[in-house]
């Protein structure tokens, strides 16, 4: 018996045994076909009821999930079975959201992934891509989109859920320290901002007729104008693409921040992106050679980058956002252990203390002088009031004398007329 005949025989017996009285033959055939297809795919596709480790009820049963990430894209596909001309409609499931199956596999095979941060760096020393993937999955699964626009506006409950999801895969060194938690919070903030921007770019194309109300807001127009102006002010652009500058720096045989800056600002043919970038690189080399020729302590690479590229708060130009920068643009020369420099520093501090004491004395004298000036000013104001009162009395006396003079002249005129 051929395979097709066996299939028809099995289907016929299945219909006779399991078809209820109110079920039509066509619908029973579709149910049988779907059931056989499901049985054939049991070994290749795990059942939906088997939860992965990343979504286990023990860890994330009460975790709030995003409605955008709980469904998968489904496309109806019609499959026609040969033999009896009956057709069946199946649902072809396309790529759904990333649930962290790759990270679950790594955890099952070798335990939690080790994450540590080197001093002065903002990204992990190892397993950077896995860590970024875990943060992205936690953000898309548990960070809300409604009624918030920034990571700092999200409730502490959602943030703690994201942290628990991250700790399910990773063993983070010094997790309890404030520095590590601040660095990870910055990573969550950056990932959340990028995710919102991706959604905005994806769904903005659906606004075809009319104008998008969000794009017409005055706040967005001002922000767009500021961003455009800042972009035009950039003297040159880098050629590193999506690869971090710190990642390139770690892979260099002889790490040099100046050479790293050159590699990230030249094209494939070895030419700089523009003439200003070439002039900046030459200035870096000139500063480095001049400090060495003078015989003094040479400038560090950080100081050279600041001297040529400028300083920006919380960001080191030339190294990207992967390194930590001191709050002040004060990059040490590395020679502060020199006794001569220590002596100069102590002398400067003593002079500063002396100057501050003299300044305090001068301030006291100024306060006394200011008090005397205020007293004299009050006396002057009171004298002005007295003079003003005196002037008013003098004007009143002048007016009375004028009236008396007019009356005397009038009386004299009357007497003269009487005699005549």
Image: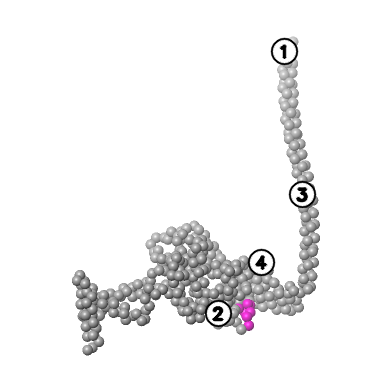
- Crowdedness of circle 1 by 10 Å Cα count: few (<14), some, many (20+)? few
Residue contact at pointers 3 and 2, CB within 8 angstroms: no
Q: What residue is disc 2 on?
A: 267
Question: Where's residue 40, x and y in %?
Answer: 32, 81
Residue indicated by mark 1? 417
Residue 256 within the segment the image draws in magenta: yes
Mark pair 1, 3: CA separation? 75 Å
The percent coordinates of residue 289 (x first, y second) are 70, 78
Residue drawn where x is 53% and y is 64% of the image: 227
Q: Secondary structure at mark 4?
A: loop
Type of colouring: one colour
Viewer can see residue 273: no
Q: Is residue 219 above or below residue 54?
A: above
Residue 122 got which mark? Answer: none
Q: Nearer the viewer, residue 377 or 1?
A: 1
Nearer the observer, 361 or 136: 136
Contact (Cβ within 8 Å) of mark 1 with mark 3: no
Discs 4/1, front:
4
Quote the CA–CA distance across marks 2 and 4: 33 Å
- With 215 as the anchor, is 237 left or right in this view? right
- Crowd around label 3: few <14 · some 14–19 · many ≥20 (10 Å): few
Circle 2 SS class:
loop
Q: Which of disc 4 and disc 3 is earlier in sequence?
A: 4
Is 20 drawn above or below residue 379 in the view shown?
below
Q: Quadrant of the C terminus?
A: top right
Labels 3 and 2: the sequence-earlier one: 2
Mark 3 and mark 2: Cα distance apart in space: 65 Å
Distance CA(mark 3)–CA(mark 4) = 34 Å
Q: Which residues are magenta?
A: 254-260
Task: Give the mark, 2 or 1, whose residue is nearer the N terminus.
Answer: 2
In the picture of the structure, the residue carrying the numbered disc 4 is 328
Q: Secondary structure at mark 3?
A: helix
């Amino acid at each position: 018996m051929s395979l097709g005949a066996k299939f028809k025989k099995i289907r016929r017996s299945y219909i006779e045994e399991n078809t209820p009285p109110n079920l039509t033959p066509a619908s029973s055939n579709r149910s049988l076909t779907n059931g056989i297809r499901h049985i054939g795919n049991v070994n290749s596709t795990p059942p939906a009821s088997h939860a992965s480790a990343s979504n286990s009820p023990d860890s994330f049963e009460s975790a709030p999930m995003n409605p955008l990430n709980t469904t998968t894209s489904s496309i109806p596909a019609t499959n026609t079975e040969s033999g009896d001309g009956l057709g069946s409609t199946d649902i072809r499931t396309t790529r759904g959201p990333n649930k962290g199956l790759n990270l679950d596999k790594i955890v099952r095979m070798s335990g939690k992934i080790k994450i540590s941060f080197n001093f002065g760096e903002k990204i992990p020393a190892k397993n950077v891509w896995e860590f970024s993937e875990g943060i992205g999955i936690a953000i898309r699964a548990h960070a809300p989109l409604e009624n918030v626009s920034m990571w700092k506006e999200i409730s502490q409950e959602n943030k703690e859920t994201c942290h628990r999801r991250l700790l399910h895969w990773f063993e983070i060194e010094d997790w309890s320290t404030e520095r590590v938690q601040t660095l990870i919070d910055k990573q969550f903030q950056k990932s959340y901002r990028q995710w919102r921007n991706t959604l905005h770019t994806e769904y903005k194309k659906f606004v075809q007729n009319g104008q998008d109300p969000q794009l017409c807001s005055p706040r967005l127009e001002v922000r767009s104008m500021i961003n455009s102006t800042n972009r035009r002010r950039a003297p040159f652009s880098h050629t590193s693409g999506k690869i971090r500058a710190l990642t390139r720096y770690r892979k260099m045989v002889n790490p040099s921040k100046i050479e790293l800056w050159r590699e990230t600002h030249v094209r494939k043919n070895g030419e700089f992106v523009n003439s200003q970038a070439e002039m900046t690189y030459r200035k870096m080399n000139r500063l480095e050679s001049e400090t060495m020729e003078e015989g003094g302590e040479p400038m560090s690479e950080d100081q050279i980058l600041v001297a040529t590229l400028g300083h920006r708060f919380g960001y080191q130009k030339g190294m990207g956002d992967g390194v930590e920068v001191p709050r002040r643009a004060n990059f040490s020369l590395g020679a502060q252990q020199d006794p001569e420099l220590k002596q100069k520093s102590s002398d400067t501090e003593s002079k500063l203390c002396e100057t501050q004491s003299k300044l305090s004395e001068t301030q006291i004298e100024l306060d006394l002088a200011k008090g005397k000036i205020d007293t004299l000013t009050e006396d002057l104001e009171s004298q002005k009031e007295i003079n003003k009162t005196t002037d008013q009395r003098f004007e009143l006396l002048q007016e009375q004398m004028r009236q008396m003079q007019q009356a005397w002249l009038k009386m004299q005129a009357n007497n003269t007329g009487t005699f005549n």
